[in-house]
Image (cartoon, rainbow, N blue to C red):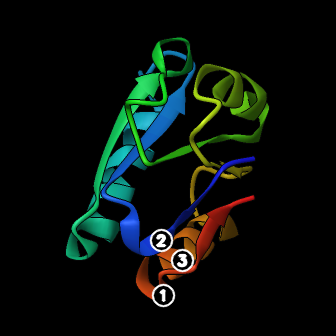
Amino acid sequence: MPTIDGSEVRRIVVACEAGMGSSVMLTSSLSQRFAALDVTVTHLPVNRLTDDDADVVVCHRGLAKRASQAAPGTPIVAFDLFLGDPAFDGLEAALREGSTIGG
C-alpha cells in the first residue's frame, strides 16, 4: 500500500458510493477540521476516483478495496463510523506531525 508523509498532504478526497448524504457531511466536517492545516477536502464517487484526484483518500472500510483499485498509487484511510471514528484522529495527528499515512 502506498504511503505519504503527512506534511506533504494538501488534497484529501472522501470517496463515497454516490455523494449524496453521509459523505457530504463528513467532507464538510473534515474540511473544517483540517482548514488550519492548509488541506483541502472534497468528495467523489469511488467509481470516478483516480490517482490524480488526491494525496490521500478517506473512505468507509466497505469501499476501501474499490478505492485502492481506482487509485492504486494513493494512500487510503479507511474508517468504520462517519462521526467520531479514531481514523480521523489518526489522520489529523499524521498531518500535524508529518508522520506516515498509509502502508
Residue 40 appears at what percent x and percent y? 26, 53
Choose between 14 and 11: the one closer to the eye: 11
Tag 2 and tag 3, C-beta contact below 8 Å: yes
What residue does disc 1 label? 97
Residue at image location 68% in from the left, 52% down from the top: 81
Residue 90 appears at what percent x and percent y? 62, 74
Q: Specify few, some or many for label 1: CA neighbours under 10 Å numbering under 14, 14-19, or 20 or more.
A: few
What residue does disc 3 label? 94
Dividing the picture into quadrants, the one containing residue 88 is bottom right
Residue 100 vertical placement versus 64 (above, below): below
Real-space CA distance between mark 2 and mark 3, rounded to the nearest whole angstrom? 5 Å
Residue 16 vertical placement versus 83 (above, below): above
What residue does disc 2 label? 6
Residue 47 vertical placement versus 49 (above, below): above
SS at circle 2: helix
Real-space CA distance between mark 1 and mark 3, rounded to the nearest whole angstrom? 5 Å
Q: Is residue 97 left or right of residue 24?
A: right
Quadrant of the rendering where the C terminus is positioned: bottom right
Tag 2 and tag 1, C-beta contact below 8 Å: yes
Q: Of the two numbered discs 2 and 1 on the same chain, state the one appearing first in sequence.
A: 2
Q: Of the two numbered discs 2 and 3 on the same chain, state the one appearing first in sequence.
A: 2
Q: Is residue 20 left or right of residue 91?
A: left
Tag 1 and tag 3, C-beta contact below 8 Å: yes
Q: Amino acid at mark 3?
A: Ala
Dividing the picture into quadrants, the one containing residue 87 is bottom right
